[in-house]
Every structure is written in C-alpha cells, then in structure tokens.
Amino acid sequence: MHRYLLRRLVEGVITVWFIATATFFAMHLVPGDPLLNDKAVPKEIRANLEQHYGLDQPLPVQYLRYLGQMVRGDFGISFTQKNRAVNDIIREHFPVSASLGLVALAIAAAGGILWGALTARYRGRWPDALIMLGVIVAISVPGFVVAALAQLAIVELNRLAGRSLLPVAGWGEWRHFVVPALVLGLGTMAYLTRLMRSSMLEVIHADYIRTARAKGLGEARIFFRHQLRNAILPVITVLGPAVAAITTGGFVIELVFAIPGLGRYFVQAVQQLDYTVIMGTTVFYGAFLVFMVIAIDILYGFIDPRIRVG
Amino acid sequence: MAGPLAADDFLPLPPQPAMERAVRPSRSYWQDGWRRLRQNRSAFAALGLVLGLLLFALAGPLLWPVDPAAQDLEQLSRPPTLGERALLVDLSSEWSGTPAAESEVGAPLPAARLGRSSALSVVGSPTSQSVRLQWQAVPGARGYILYRTDHPPMEGDDLGLPLVRIIGGSEVSHEDRLNPQPGRHYYSVVATDGVDEADGYRTLAVEVQLGLTLDEARRRGHELPAGASVTLAPHPLGTDYLGRDLLARLIHGARISLFIGLTAPLLSIVIGAFYGGVAGYLGGRTDALLMRFADFVVALPFLLFMILFRIGFGIGPGESGIAPLLLAMVLLGWPGTARLVRGQILRIREEGYVQAARLMGAGTPYLVLRHMLPNTMGVILVSLTFAVPSAIFTEAFLSFIGMGVAPPTPSWGSMCNDGIKTMLTHPHELLFPALVISLTVLAFNLLGDGLRDALDARLRGRE
C-alpha cells in the first residue's frame, strides 16, 4: 500500500512538472508579452522593465529560474495587477471556485445517485422514461445556454413574486450559490445518472439480491442496504473526472453569473498574457486535479477492499 | 488410406458449391451492425437528423442564398417574419404641431400646483421613423418633459430618462425621431414650471410600426409616395442585433461548427488510432513510454491549454481562426482514442485468428490492415460519434468566451455569444443557435448510443 501510494505520488509530481513545462513554453510561444499591454514606453524603460521581470534572460534560464521559484511555493507577482502576488490571487479566488464546485458536485452526486437508482427501479415505466429524457436534454444543451435560461427564469420568478427572491448574478451570500451550483452540476448529474442506472441494473439481478429476497427482507431494506450501496461503487470512481469537468465548467458559470472565481482570472490573464498568473493558475489547477484523482483512487480502495492495491 | 502421401494429396479440392451453402445467409459485422442500428428507432431517427443537419449546412446556401454578412439597418433584432410591411415616411420637412393658445396656458404656476395634461394623442401613423405627439396644454406650465418607456410606468419614478425637454407652455407637440423600435411604447408627458416637474403625468400606449424614409425606400428600388407601404425582405428566423439574417447565419454557422465538430474528432482519432496502434502492436517498453506520454497529455487542464494554444497559434486580421482552433483541439484530443485503440490492439494481438494468420506466414502490414484495423473500426466509430458533441461544445464554449471563431465569421457558439447579450429583449437571437447546437449534440449522442449497442461486441445480448 505504501509503495503504491509513493509511486502514485511520484507520478503525480512528474505530471505536474510536465504541465508546468508545457504551459511555460506554450505561453512563451505566444507572440507579444505582458509588457505590451501598457502604453508604448521608451526603449530604456522597457529594457529596465524586462530586466526587472527577468524577461531579458534566455528562455531556458527563465524556465529554470521559474521552476526554482515554483518549487519553493512562490508563483511570483502578477504583471498586470501591480504588486499583487499570484499566491494571493489564488488564495483569494480559489475558495470561491472551490466552494461553488463543491456544492455543485454534491448536488450532482446526490441527484445522480437518486435519479439513477429510481430509473433502474422503475425500468421501462414512466419514471424511467421521464428521467432519461431529462438526462438526454441535460447532456445536449450547452452549459452557457442553461445558465442564460436559468437567469431568465430567475427574472420571471422575481417578477411573479414581486420582490427579489434570488439574485440574478453576483456573489456573497448563500442565495447566490443556489442557481449557479445547480446549473454547474447539471451536466455531471446527467452523466452520473446514466452510470448509476447501468450499475444498478447489474446489481438488481445479482445473486445476493435474490438471496436477500428469499430470506424475506423487506423491499426498502433490499433497495437501500443491498442494491444502492453496491451500485454506488462505480460512481465513486468517476468522481475524479467529475471534479475536472466541474472545475472547467465553472469557467462559464463564473462568467455568466459574474462570480469572482479563479476561472475568470485565468481567462483575463490569458487575454493579457500575464505570464505569472497563467503559470500560477494552470499549475495550481493541474496539481489540484492530478492529486484529486489520486486521492479518489485511494479512497476507492478504502470503500471497496476487493480492489485495494499493494 | 494406406501408403505414403503423394504430392497431389496437397492440391486444393475443386470447389463444391453444394457444401458451401449455409443454412442462413451469413452476415458480415457491418451488415449485422446496420441491422441492429435500424431496429433501434431513436438511433435511426438520430441518423436521419444528422444527415438532415449535414444537408442543411451543405445545401442551405443554395436554398436560402442570403448573404450572412449583409446588414439591414432598418431591421435590427427583429423577430421572425416572412416579409415585414413598412410604411413610407417623408422626413424631408420638419413637423411642428399646433401650438396651444396663450389663453389656454395662462400665468405660470409652481410645479407643485401643476396638473396633468388632459389629453395626449398621436397625429398620423406612428412609425419607427417618426412618432408625432400632440397633447393638451396644462394651465400654468412653462414647459414639458416627454418620456418613452417599453413598459407601462407604474409610478412617477419609473419613467426613466427623459426623451426630450420642451421649453414653453404653449409648445404642446413633439416629433420623436429617435428611432423607436417597432412594437409598443409608452409615451408620458409631464408639465414643468421650467425647473421642477409636476407629479401628475399622462401616458399613451403607442403601437409603433416599421417605417422607411423615402430616401431609404428609393435606395431599395421603391419609387412610391409617402404613405404607401412596401414589403421588406423576409427573415424566417428574424435578424440579429446588427440586422443580419439569422437563418443565413445559422446555415453558414452550421458549415463552420459542423466542419470543426467533425474534422477535429476525425483528425484526433486518426492520430490517436495510429499512436495507440503502434503502442499496442509494439508493446513492451515502447508501449509503456508512449502511453505514459499520453497520460501526461490527458492530465493537462484541457480548457486552459485550449485557450493557450488558440491564442498561441494566433489569427491575423481578416482570418476566421478556424485553423488554430482545429489544431488546438487535435493536439489535445488524441490520447483518448490512443488508449482505446491500444487496448483493442493488445486484445486482438492475442486472439486465435491473429496467431493463426501469423503461423501461416502473414506479414505485419497484412495483420494490421486485414485483422487489427477492421476489428477496431467499430470501437473507433463509436468513439468518433461521441467525440463530435464534445467538439461542438468546445467550439461553442470557446466562441462563447470570445476565443473561438473570430467575428464576423458566424459559428453557432459565437451566435449564442451575441444572442445572450440581448436575451431579455430579443430571445430569438439566443434561442435558434442554442436550439441547433442542442439538436446536433442530441442527434450525435443518440446515434453514438445506438452505434455502441450495434457495434460493440461486448455489449451484445445485454439490454
């Protein structure tokens, strides 16, 4: 177990290094540089600035220097937002993205498991058809369209109620969470519903279910204790990719609902070619996703001892 | 049977037709798959929908030869119409209504004591070129303020910004030429004492119809007098905020979106199949090394790199940005297929028929072309169908955040991006592109489900 864990961690670190390297060189291939955003500056000042930021060095030197800085946990200072450390930007805005993502993930997981179990239980009957129709619609409509429609719905709701029940956009209190998290989790929920359905259909015909029934267990007990608990296992394996899907999906939601998350900063940084912010956010997100997947794999081993490795 | 074997014992037997007749007609893998697909009603309908969409993109410009970039500034953000009627309006001379008599106005009064106008009416036909209003003078007023709103005002504060301030108590008419959009507008008039406004106001709902100036009509080839009406070009799906025909943009956007949505997965699948095939076939250390690299590429934050690449490859002025988008999608999209194909190849390599073929002296090209490739085709096709919706989503998303196809090239994603800004007032601009994206993705998802059921041998016999 320890050796397995160690191997996974080493692999994770190499992956993060690869991400950092690929981002660094891809970013420097982009024509222009962050200093071009300012007004035209005299040659001397420009040379001074380049020296200040270390941009006058050859690329490999810059790369090694950055790598050294990164290993010490310092992502540098933003080019466009003067005097703001990338670490501060991440510290300030990642919790926003993360909390939104976490709520969305919780909604997606709970909804997916519930709907999936229901479709399997009522297979071929109207609840199954209805839910699967909802799933196919949720998968087919782009996230930003759902977000826009949700905003329209909020406007109508507020108009009907005659007062502001839910805010259309913004950030601050729990009411800002509700709709964006729901919209963000929708796609993943649909995916998990499908997965849960097929997993549940396999479990329903398992021998131990027949045994349980033969023993005379009640239907509710069979459903919750024997079917649901066993069918959930495959759903947990895809939580890693689901976290990735929700983080990237968060970009759109943050843009549409004007939420001050990290995704918005990244898009902005790329447009302004803010080297340090691009590197910081990409490496941070990359590391987050890589170690999330590892954590879920290990978690899976605890939940299902049959597949525990090492 | 006794005696040694002679050389002619090894000659093939002459064909014996009677022995080859099987009980049932034999079906190839693809024939069987096609039969299964046809039985799956929703997948078959989805196939029809996909073909219909392709036809829409390919033949659309022939059936609806409207330039997607042509603007009609008289018809901005108009809802679907089959040829709107427009009234010709003569704007060559200014209109001034009838001023009120001095006796009606009387001595000036402070704002607090001013009443509201007793009548507000429209003179002539209200059009988007001009709305002529005339109202009853308020005794004691030194001027008037005119407001225009889209909703009936609920209280005094709800009037918004003034349309015009009129000085002089006897000036009781105004011609609104500030381009009122066709539709219902609410004009409100408030009396003032020259500085402050009175509390009371008179509101009139005006149904404004589309108008065209005589000059504009002449430019469009209508030599008709003012008051006549002409039929404008039809826009079955309406126009966007720049007055461009939405149907034409949807057709041309389909060409872009479907081109990207089909080409990007196709290219990444060709590359991925080759990469995975080589890895699976060679096996051993090469395989481990190649697949580790693929794992790294998978671990890259997809969207972040998409945006980086998209900007890195850059687009010059006047370019549509399709090539950098495609390149970015292919560079990041291939590992999925590579893994899939490698797994298949590893499995097939150990199959009995491949061993048999190898024993009989088949070379590598024969094995790959005759056995491995055809046997992975089904899996590849299924993953292609599922890759199309995600490619369409990616294109739409990147265009939505303004990093996809560059304007004015229409794509479904960029149309959604435009439409979302006017969503509250003109929902049709978002609705139609969103609808075709959803329909396309739905069709490919259903088709993918059907193909997987029809072609994937592992799932045979399961529900």
Image (cartoon, coloured by chain):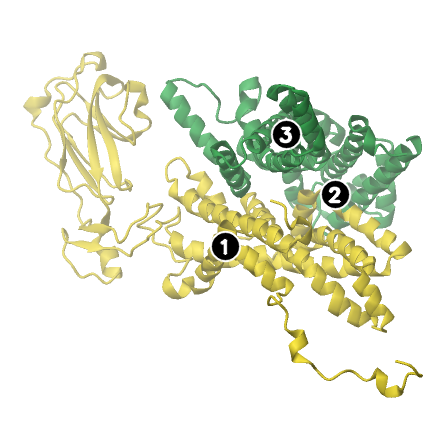
Chain colours: A green, B yellow
Judged from the image, the secondary structure of the residue bearing numbered disc 2 is: helix
Position of residue B422 in the picture relative to residue B456 (left or right): left
Amino acid at pointer 1: Phe
The dot on residue A261 is: 3
Amino acid at pointer 3: Gly
Q: Residue furthest front?
A: B2
Between disc 3 and disc 2, whose residue precedes? 2
Residue A156 lies, with reference to residue A277, above or below; the image says above
Residue neighbourhood size for the residue with mark 2, other residues' Cα within 10 Å, grouped as few (<14), some (14–19), many (≥20): few
Residue at which label 2 appears? A45
Residue at which label 1 appears? B44
Of B414 and B437, the residue lying toward us: B437
Residue displayed at 90% across by 55% down: B284
Q: In front: mark 1 or mark 3? A: 1
Residue A192 picture quarter: top right
Residue displayed at 73% across by 41% down: A275
Residue B41 lies, with reference to residue B120, above or below; the image says below
